[in-house]
Amino acid sequence: MNRMNDTSLLWQVFGSATGLTRYYPAAEWQNKQNKVDLYDVRRRPWYVQGAASPKDMLILMDVSGSMSGMPLNLMKTSVENMLDTLADDDFVNIVFFNDTAETVGCFKNLVQANVRNKRELKNAVQKMTAKGVTNYTAGLQYAFNQLLDTKNISRANCNKMIMLFTDGGEDRARQVFKNNNTTVRVFTFSVGQHNYDISPIQWMACNNKGYFFEIPSIGAIRLNTQEYLDVLGRPMVLAGSGYKQVQWTNVYKDALGLGLVITGTLPVFNLSKEGGKQNQLILGVMGVDVSLDEVKRLTPQFRLGANGYFFAMDPNGYVLLHPNLLPKVPNFQEPVTLDFLDAELHHDKKVMIRKNMISGESGSETFETFIKSVDERYVDKAVRTYTWTTVNSTDYSLALAMPSYSTYHIKAKKKDEHSAAEDAESLLRSLSEPIGHVFIAPREFCKTVQKSENNTEFLLNFLAELQKNKPDSENCESDLVYNLLLDSSITTKLVETTWVNVDRQGIGIKALFVTTDSGITKVYPNSAAAEWDEALEPYNASTYKRSLNNNGSVYKPPYTPESSHDNFTGSVLASLAVEVTIDGKTLKPAVIGVQLDQEAWTTKFKFLATNQTGEAPARRMCGGLGSCEMDCEASVNELECVLLDDGGFLVLSNQDDHQDKIGKFFGVVNPGLMRALYSFYVYGIVTSYDFQSVCDPDTEPRTDAAPRGVHIPSIANLLNLAWWTSAAAWSVLQQLLYSLTFQAWLDPVPVMAASESNKEKMLCIMLQTQYFLNKNVTSFRKLQDCGNCSRFMHAEKIAHSNLLLLIAEKMTCNECDNRPLSQEEKLSEGPDQCLLAQEPRFRKGPEVCLDADNFQEDASDCGKGSMLQPSVFALFILPLFTLCLLGPAAPYIS
């Protein structure tokens, strides 16, 4: 019925509280070969967010001496699994206790349960050791203090709960509950196989609207750390349909291949009555998926230009639809959370925009900000206008970021069939005639055009479609098609009337190119197309986007990694945006450029940077202690003359040993000079974190604790025959004791799933560094003093370009700082989560909270525990068996 009412619906899914999942329409479930399928709908982000109101959770861990060994390991794994049941609307902290109580890590209060905070807590949990005695009063009092202290602390302000993990004890801490508890649920978990009294911790759960669970082995962890959600769903059931509202999730990866999605969820209740009482059971969660790719198709991206974009934001400040939201982990289970302030480079006004969007306000701001290039090697300062407003009936806000030149765009007039056919003919001619090779962007010009990885084949498929259907047919985006045909005609005339007459060899040009907003890229001569490696979609091409952001020519050497020892290959690209003014409105509909012949321009560079360019030039001498002439060709052994781009990459040099380093970051080529340019503020630096990177898993060997009660022998033990006779007997006896005395034994661990998953890529944080030319520095002269020697440096910014000419004497000593500077991204721990937690970013939680305070629920169903019953026969027979196994004791010799 839903699909009939709205044909745009994709997956509709129901997840039950028992773990059953049903999708509509049906699809084949994909299982990975040789892997255990651990999919559980109750752990999917949309189910977690839809099954209960937000939570303030305090996890309380008993680390007294009785928890050592296997119980401690079970508890650590259980707590990690518990953290995985929390979403970004929840808040959490972990406290350990024995004689006293303390937080496990650096977080002194509850923190948002986002991915990075949960990772910090998990790492802290793994470092815990067991010692001391159990003091429930100290632990519970500390937990209540954390939950009930709300002064200037960000939190969910909804379901408050304590999750107590312990092996049992005698103390019920009645006075603590009497003095503190009116609103806090208490869930208790008996961890490990033991014979301690569990009735006190069962009492804690049953008298505080919670539930008691047992975790005797690793196989019980997943189920028992997520079923507390059923208890939290009780108030939602009692509230009835009047309180139902659609909850929209964060972005996450769909399990069936839709890519990035958001899901609108509603809980499903059992409204029947039993014995006159309202049933409190939540049956599950219903969800409807919305694919972000489908939403993008509805946005007029190609009317915004290459540097304009939409993005949306949820109440936590996380972005949707943002061009920088590019998660790289294919099967990541957590929500894909990228904060707006992490998606873009910092600006104080962006902090204000984020707060206004979360608060549901509308507004507009225009300001200059740093823009990171697509290849993440450069930053440009450019003016952007941000306009934002709310999205009706949702918690989201929508924003538009635009440069001024994209406010208007060219719209081609519809042509008659004959004119359209002529323009299409020019596209076909470009594949065979010397009028420049044409690439077209892989856009959906027509729905029926067959896509292809080969651009020539895609172009032929497009032309075949135009022969069958008119550009303005219902299958085609007529504006895109007509603009493409218009630009094809214009660029063909450019080649035939201008480019064919250019003396390319004489001026050192290998090729000419033009890229237009409509998706046309034309390269002349045709033979140069084989080496063209720019993105065929202009909106994804770094050269195209950077040219629009800059007012002058943009020079870009081919990138050479810092660690590369290969000889330089490729050519420097020089590009310039075409500005067109129509009725007083400025547009940038295209970018033109050339591909330079590196060898020819190196020769030209040496000649131009000499004293030989005038008829009677005055002799210019080097400064400092040298006596060389300022001639980059004649004084090649004394002077280092280089052209650097605005990112600090080497473009041209007079040094022979630099020719295979073109395109490398200059901080690696000549660290001392680059450090001087940075210290003298010729170059500035921008650093940022990439939170979406992926890395290989940690290959260092892990040391896992042995099971409880298993002794790890030393080398001396292994070499001692007496140890073998006694220890071997004890090992057999101990295992028999557990297997015979208790009817349950440790469950087997699904090793295949764990080991296979460790081979997959994992999320990591990379620190990125970009250098930029200081616009306030156009000319620079300095004497660099290095103690026992000095050198003269002269730098000039080349007008109307992104280039810097640097001339410097070669250093005759090594006393200046010559440590290499790196521009490449590197693995990082990221920002200090402990400091960030002290000043959390602004957020807004759901407006409706359904917790135990609002409704009178029946808390009698609170879990049932059972003591492990020892075998009486085994207890009597084992001592006799031990005596027989060990035999008579050897005589003691003093």
Image (cartoon, rainbow, N blue to C red):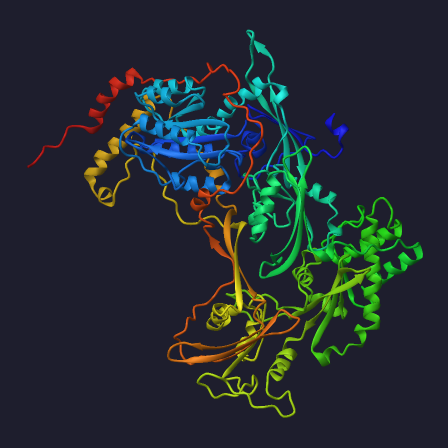
Q: Position of residue 100 (x, y in %)?
A: 30, 32
Q: Is residue 117 left or right of residue 799?
A: left
- Percent across and percent down for residue 487 are 81, 60
Residue plotted at (15% across, 28% down)? 888
Vertical arrangement, residue 337 with respect to residue 600, above or below: above
Q: Residue extending furthest bottom?
A: 616
Quarter the N terminus occupies: top right
Report x, y in % for residue 606.
Answer: 60, 82
Q: Provide residue 889's location: percent of width, then percent of height.
A: 14, 30
Image check: 871 left or right of 160? left
Is 383 displayed left or right of 32 in the figure?
Answer: right
Task: Compare residues 651 and 817 and report the one nearer the observer.
Answer: 817
**Residue 837, visible in the rendered structure:** yes
* Position above or below: 523 against 611: above
- Residue at the farthest top position: 275
Q: Is residue 835 above or below residue 520?
A: above
- Quadrant location of residue 722? top left
The residue positioned 38% from the left and 17% from the top of the image is 203
Q: Quadrant of residue 362?
A: top right
Is 299 or 201 nearer to us in this picture?
A: 299
Would you say residue 868 is visible in this rendering?
A: no
Q: Is residue 521 left or right of residue 675?
A: right
